[in-house]
Image (cartoon, rainbow, N blue to C red):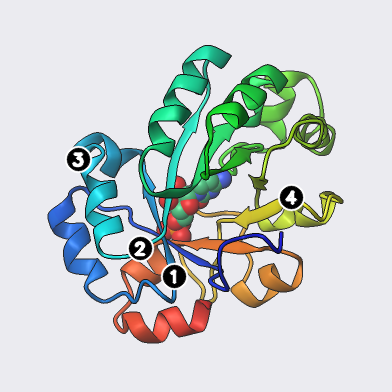
Amino acid sequence: TIQVMSSKRLIIALDFKNIAEMSYFISNLDPKKCIVKVGLQLFIAEGPKVLDFLSQRDFEIFLDLKLHDIPNTVKKSVEEISQYNVKLTTIHLQGGQDMIQAANEAKGSTKILGVSLLTSLDESDIRKLYNNDFKKQFNNLINIAMETNIDGIVCSSQELELIQDPSLIKVVPGIRNQNSSDDQKRVMTSKEAYSKGADFIVVGRPITQAKDIEESIKDYS
Ligand code: C5P
């Protein structure tokens, strides 16, 4: 984990609908203090120019597209991603070992994170999908990850302690330092997540919707 780029450990999710809204928000951000995450919505709306826009402003980028396809398609897609200044990107561990290896071969200096089980799935979804319990299914995926050279994984704070491998970068969304009534269910504070081994946390709305953005960044750093 030590080889991870810098001392920054806060990733801010730029869940905006276009570059105009995003650029207004990022004028509040110091690229030395956070990494920024571009997700599907913004990437579909604006395409790769959003990556150039951010990297010209010295931001380190996490491109979160959660790729899941046959190995060849994922390999070609990761090859394209690695042409941009993208530090971290995501694939689904469910794609299996060959898909993960294919992503690894194409990654260049971009680090690959495997998404384990989406935090939107609960115990009963996992039962229906895999006829298995959540923990076992999670462990199957982590075992697959560990048999490859994948750089890290994305998981909820509750699953951090199920991951034994210290060399995997652990990236954790679902962080709330204040009570909120949004859609995140399995939440934890930033302090708890860091202390349970998160190398990076991903925070969206608590920072993007904050009254005092600078204060909220301090709070989650
Ligand atoms: O606003 P909020 O802090 O909930 O944003 C969290 C970000 O992390 C969103 O961009 C969301 O898509 C992402 N994410 C998540 N849970 C996952 C994977 C990604 O919340 N399992």
Question: Label 3's element?
Answer: helix
Question: Label 4's element?
Answer: loop
Q: Earlier in the sequence, mark 2 or mark 1?
A: 1
The answer for how far apart the CA atoms under marks 4 and 3 are is 31 Å
Which residue occupies 21% across, 73% down?
A: 27
User: Looking at numbered disc 2 in the image, what kind of residue is underneath it?
Assistant: Phe
Q: Earlier in the sequence, mark 4 or mark 2?
A: 2
The residue identified by callout 2 is 59
Q: Could you tell me if residue 183 is visible in this image? A: no
Which of these two is toward me, 79 or 50?
79
The answer for how far apart the CA atoms under marks 3 and 2 are is 17 Å
Q: Which mark is residue 46?
A: 3
Residue 180: x and y in percent read: 47, 68
The residue identified by callout 4 is 168
On screen, residue 79 versus residue 156, left or right, reads left
**Crowding near pointer 4: few (<14 within 10 Å), some, many (20+)?**
many
Q: Could you tell me if residue 101 is visible in this image? A: yes
The answer for how far apart the CA atoms under marks 2 and 1 are is 8 Å
Can you tell which quarter of the image residue 171 is in?
Answer: bottom right
**Crowding near pointer 2: few (<14 within 10 Å), some, many (20+)?**
many
Q: Which mark is residue 34?
A: 1
Q: Earlier in the sequence, mark 1 or mark 4?
A: 1
